[in-house]
Image: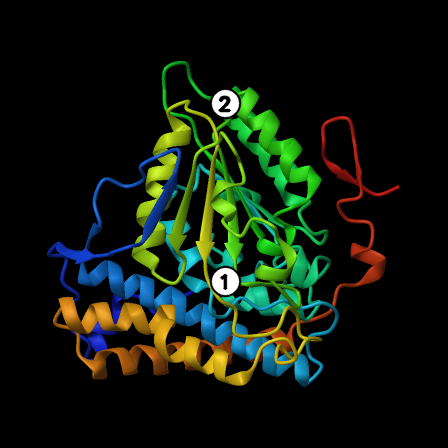
Amino acid sequence: MWFLGRSACRHGVRAWSTTPVKVRIPMAHVGHRVDGPATNEAVTTEAELIDFFKLMYTMRRMEITCDNEYKARSIRGFCHLYDGQEAIATGIEKAFSRNDSWITSYRCHCIMLARGGTVEEIFAELMGKITGATGGKGGSMHFYKKSQNFYGGQGIVGAQVPVGTGLALANKYLAAPGEPMNVAVACYGDGAANQGQIWESANMASLWKLPMIFCIENNQYGMGTSVSRSSSNNDYYTMGNHIPGLKIDGMNVLAVREGFKYAKDHCASGKGPIFIECSTYRYHGHSMSDPGTTYRNRDEIATMRATRDPIDHVKKLLTDYCDTKDDDLKKIEKDIRTQVAAAADRAKQAALPDPAKHLLDNVYLDDQGKDVKP
């Protein structure tokens, strides 16, 4: 498992409460041609918030370890980190079922984790090892887990959006008459939001009323260019014009979960697509080759960490609304740090793919769709 399981209760951590609590999420949603969620409250439990915390903290430690291993040259090539944006992946996963389809950009390590990947197979893939999620062939930008309807990261900016629209078409085609459809989401950044292929995809999704969610993860900078300099319309959730849209606080996991529950119900019922803008922030630069401090200053990053951090927000919910103690959370953090470090060590020890055996895997298929060697 990617997180520390309930077995922690046997080591001094009490069982987490499943008593429902109501949490206010004021100003979490703004609608365009749609009202959005009917209430500014979300119902959760201590147990659920602990699960959020474990997943999000595992994501954070995994990405920090990726940073260190990249600098140590254990990981090479392109590498785009997700720390700061963990609430989005976690909130979407909690709003969806695994029957719903998900495709994203090259910033995809944490989406793979949310969709059932393990920390070890993610590290192994980043290191080009045979035990990696795609056998060491995909690397940082091309994670994939079809069994969980995760259709990967895309190396070309915006290229995932028309593919995601195709997934939505498949979901509509395969839906039983009169039953809610499974939905598809394509996540992309503000830097991709004005691409022509997105407009073409949105047009088809609207014409055919596809169960498609266009999710803009607005982390404020497309590579090194701020949204105010790159887009004439900074309200990305309105970019569908007549297509409804919803702006969500992407640093609040409950706001994301509630917003995507609403979006899923909207699309699954046959009302057509919706645009979602998740306002968020990435702590690292665009990629490991970008220090992230030439177009923004360190004070800006430090302020965001101190006032808007999505993991600190979950910790505050646990201590304010539940009976969770700081020592409980510190123990979980310590255990996750240990597990992530151990997963990195195991990944380093794994073998590289053997070109003679694996180079031509998944290249040629026979008439039955089975892998064959030429």
Comparing 137 with 291, the one in front is 291
Residue 118's tag is: 1
Q: Is residue 191 visible?
A: yes
Q: How is the image coloured?
A: rainbow
Farthest-out residue, right = 374
Check disc 2 and report the residue beneath it. 209
In the figure, 273 relative to 75: above or below?
A: above
Decide if residue 306 is on the left or right side of residue 289: left
- Is disc 2 placed on a helix, strand or loop? loop
Amino acid on which disc 1 is placed: Thr
Indicate the quadrant where residue 315 lies: bottom left
Name the residue located 37 percent from the left edge and 24 percent from the top edge.
269
Marks 1 and 2, how far apart at CA: 35 Å
In the figure, 108 relative to 284: above or below?
A: above
Indicate the quadrant where residue 103 lies: top right
* Place of residue 246 in the rendered image (x, y in percent of width and height, measured from the top left): 40, 43
Among the two numbered marks 1 and 2 on one chain, the one whose residue lies closer to the N terminus? 1
